[in-house]
Image (cartoon, grey):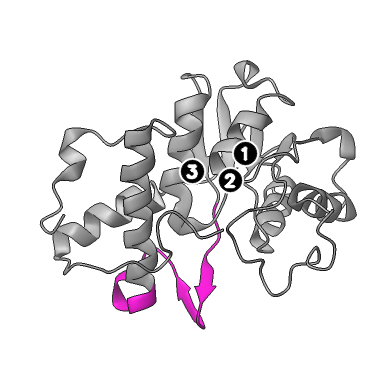
Amino acid sequence: MKPLISKEPVIPDLNEMDVDFLTALTFEKEVIPQKCDALFIFSGTHSGHWEKAIEAYKYNYIDTIVVTGGRSLTGIPHPDWDGNSDIEISEAQVIVSYLVSAGIPSEKIFMEEKSTNSLENVIYAKEVFDFTMIQTLMVVCKSHVAGRQIRTLKKHLPRQIEYIPYTFNSVYKGIEVNRYNWMETEVGRKRVWGEYLRIKHYGIKGDILPLDGSCNLLSND
């Protein structure tokens, strides 16, 4: 199934203000990691999904972990993904297997494996974990999608929750995309611009927290 918005859309010319705006919007805020009530792992096949969770647990940032993910209908699995050979294995199952192998007790892990996208990650996670009981939630996801995915959480979870991004960078065509260098390469600009388009689209659709009026003032948009 083809993604609704291309991973590599046509990019307009961006000035310095546009770059600053897009960085803050798509990568979310930079915060110092802190002790949180729980950790939420958005589904995916990149090793960062479990490596960052294991790191957070070992640093004692979290005790409870919510793992999400069935099988994506649009994504291409990471080349190193262990679940490639068996379509019956959910992304959540593979992630949990790594967490348990790293010594994290299974009773501290809550798992849903019905979701096929970020919105469903959140909706189905609510069936296995009571988010009304927490105040802080650490979030593991790719760095350049943090803005969209945290907006998904904010739309559907209790308002009292504070979100702490705990992200990892991705590599496309041999180029790492992060908050400091994305604007320097075509692949980085395409990935970030695509995220901006998704945030606008899904905000209007009602799936995520929408942009306010001041967030639609890109000079080329």
Secondary structure under tag 1 reads helix
**Residue at 63% over, 39% down:** 40
Label whose residue precedes the other's in the sequence (1 or 3): 1
Location of residue 100 with respect to 176 vertically, above or below: above
| Residue identifier under label 2 | 117
Q: Tell which tag, 1 or 3, sits nearer the viewer.
A: 1
| Residue identifier under label 3 | 149
Work out whether residue 182 can be spotted.
no
Judge left or right: residue 67 versus residue 13: right
Work out whether residue 191 can be spotted.
yes
Badge 3: residue crowd in 10 Å (few <14, some 14–19, many ≥20)? many
Judge left or right: residue 201 versus residue 33: left
**Residue at 48% over, 75% down:** 176
Q: Position of residue 160 (x, y in %)?
A: 48, 19
**Residue at 65% over, 25% down:** 126
Label whose residue precedes the other's in the sequence (2 or 3): 2
The stretch of residues the image draws in magenta is 167-187
Q: CA distance from mark 2 to mark 3?
A: 10 Å
| Residue identifier under label 1 | 121
On the image, which quarter does residue 182 sit in?
Answer: bottom left
User: Could you tell me the amino acid type at mark 3?
Assistant: Gln
User: Could you tell me the amino acid type at mark 1?
Assistant: Asn
